[in-house]
Amino acid sequence: MTFVNWLKRNLVVIAGLLTLAYLLLPNVIVTIFSFNKPNGRFNYEWQQFSTDAWKDPCGVSGLCGSLSISLQIALWATLGATALGTAIAFALVRYRFRARGAINSLIFLPMAMPEVVMAASLLTLFLNMGARLGFWTILIAHIMFCLSFVVTAVKARVMSMDPRLEQAAQDLYAGPFQTFVRVTLPIAAPGIAAGALLAFALSFDDFIITNFNAGSTVTFPMFVWGSAQRGTPVQINVIGTAMFVIAVLFVLASMVVGNRRNRRKACSTSVYS
Amino acid sequence: MSTLTEAPPPLSPPAPERKPPRKRGRWTPYWLLLPGILWLVVFFAAPMVYQASTSVQTGSLEEGYKVTWHFVTYWDAVSEYWPQFLRSVAYAASATVLCLLLGYPLAYLIAFRAGRWRNLIMILVIAPFFTSFLIRTLAWKTILADGGPVVGVLNTLHVLDVTSWLGWTAGDRVLATPLAVVCGLTYNFLPFMILPLYTSLERIDGRLHEAAGDLYARPSTVFRKVTFPLSMPGVVSGTLLTFIPATGDYVNASLLGSADTGMIGNVIQSQFLRVLDYPTAAALSFVLMAAILAMVTFYIRKSGTEDLV
């Protein structure tokens, strides 16, 4: 009876942890199979433990080249989308002007549109303009679909900002530029960082829009897609595992830094109070 | 054109009386908006219009296309591909329901029960985003493989008999069946359900739960009358963020499904990139867009959350 009671009380926790397991199961499989020595072209069945792929992650032709293209595109797309998106977010939150409703829906629509539709329509445009498909068309497409997500992330942060802080800065004779750099930007920074991180992840991982607009350029997701037909090298699992580990470490590190900063802030305020 | 009038003439003498400082920023919002909005108009809105015109064109790749208002393309496209349309909606709807059922407990756990584990669980929800989703989807091939553990367990429990009878699986297989596609879709869009749910659950004041408990509500009643209604914004945006992309997705159907589980995304992709029949492809993606917009509008009306979007 006590077990049933315990089960009842912790049902949500158990169900939640099962979902978490469902979410992480493929990552576990990817990690395990990065140590596999496949027998044949496909790496779907466990054969034998080996660290060969980890010793030579670039051993497959085209893999690291596609990885570097993806990284470049993701970096530029992040920069572009963050710059354009932050400006839009500030304009939408801080100013009242005509056509705000129309602009809001223009920003919402790319997020609400299936990727195939966007990808296909952009391809029709590029084909009709006679644009050469490749690095630049991918970059244009990525900035386009990342933009909305950046705007949403930054908008959330700017909306919760107290405008009186900026007024206070101006009362203390800070110029508009100084106010922006010393007050506005630091407060908005977490939102901008979140938007940039989201843009990077979305761009790096995008397959559907890239597949339509890439021409003969091969990004990392496209390499993986191709390999699913031709035969998946173990190195793909190595890269997948490495990306997961790096992401977790990166987030953990940022949390440690954030905690330390908070603690320092807490200490300094307790000194002054 | 307005750029010319906005730029201050460089050699003009300073105005005798300064405008009040409020007026100075009159053009600022437009300058801030201009580059980004221009980008969206040129590379998002204009292509949509362009695609609309492509869908009523006829011609061939060699001779070029002309707008002929040939609406029959739409009729042909829909009458030929309605099974894929229906399948897309059915798969996406199943995946959305599964995401809600699976995602709610996890979002609830993070919001109310995780304590000091909250950040860690949050990281574990988001981190898979950074491993390529194609790699993770391919991992499902291993998990659902014919001789694998999942198929084995389902077979021993005689679940596969039932699912095969329902048409979700085929014989002793899970891979290359609708069940595999729905499983992949659910997996891929689960974070998009969990995050909005978590955001809306986190905003709920815990004292409301205590108050409901003080008024002799049982835990299930508290959930039904307090927690769930207050989390409706998250439910609505989560289901939209799951359903819309899942309907257009073709990756899961390609990697985990078979020729019999093709979704409308697969058709659009092959019409555009392999068959090169642009009018049909454009018509198909237009019908898809219209169908989704109609369903979303209906859903938002029904759930009474129009102000959310």
Image: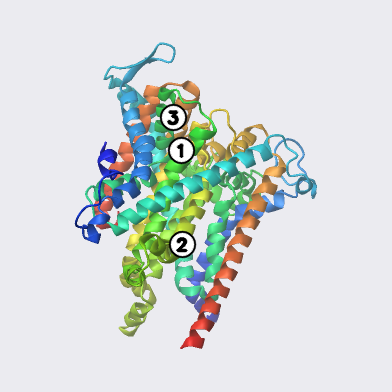
Callout 1: SS: helix
Residue visible at 53% across and 60% down in the picture: B125
Few, some or many residues within 10 Å of mark 2 (<14, 14–19, 20+): some
Name the residue tied to disc 2: A189
Residue B175 at x, y percent in the picture: 58, 42
Callout 3: SS: helix
Image: A203 above or below B127: above
Q: Mark 2 lies on which chain?
A: A
Q: Do the residues labelled 1 and 2 touch (CB within 8 Å)?
A: no
Left or right: where A186 falls relative to B296? right
Q: Mark 3: which amino acid?
A: Leu
Residue visible at 55% across and 78% down in the picture: A264
Residue visible at 46% across and 38% down in the picture: A141
- Residues under labels 3 and 1: Cα distance? 10 Å
Kindly identify which numbered label has been placed on residue B50. none
Q: Mark 1 lies on which chain?
A: A
Same subunit, labels 1 and 2: the answer reads yes
Q: Mark 2: which amino acid?
A: Ala
Residue A52 at x, y percent in the picture: 80, 46
Same subunit, labels 3 and 1: the answer reads yes
Callout 2: SS: helix
Name the residue tied to disc 1: A141
Q: Mark 1: which amino acid?
A: Ala
Residue B248 at x, y percent in the picture: 42, 39
> Of the residues under marks 3 and 1, which one precedes in the sequence?
3
Q: Are marks 3 and 2 in contact (CB under 8 Å)?
A: no
- Residues under labels 3 and 2: Cα distance? 35 Å
Name the residue tied to disc 3: A123
Left or right: where A168 falls relative to B177? left
Comparing A151 with B278, the one in front is: A151
- Residues under labels 1 and 2: Cα distance? 25 Å
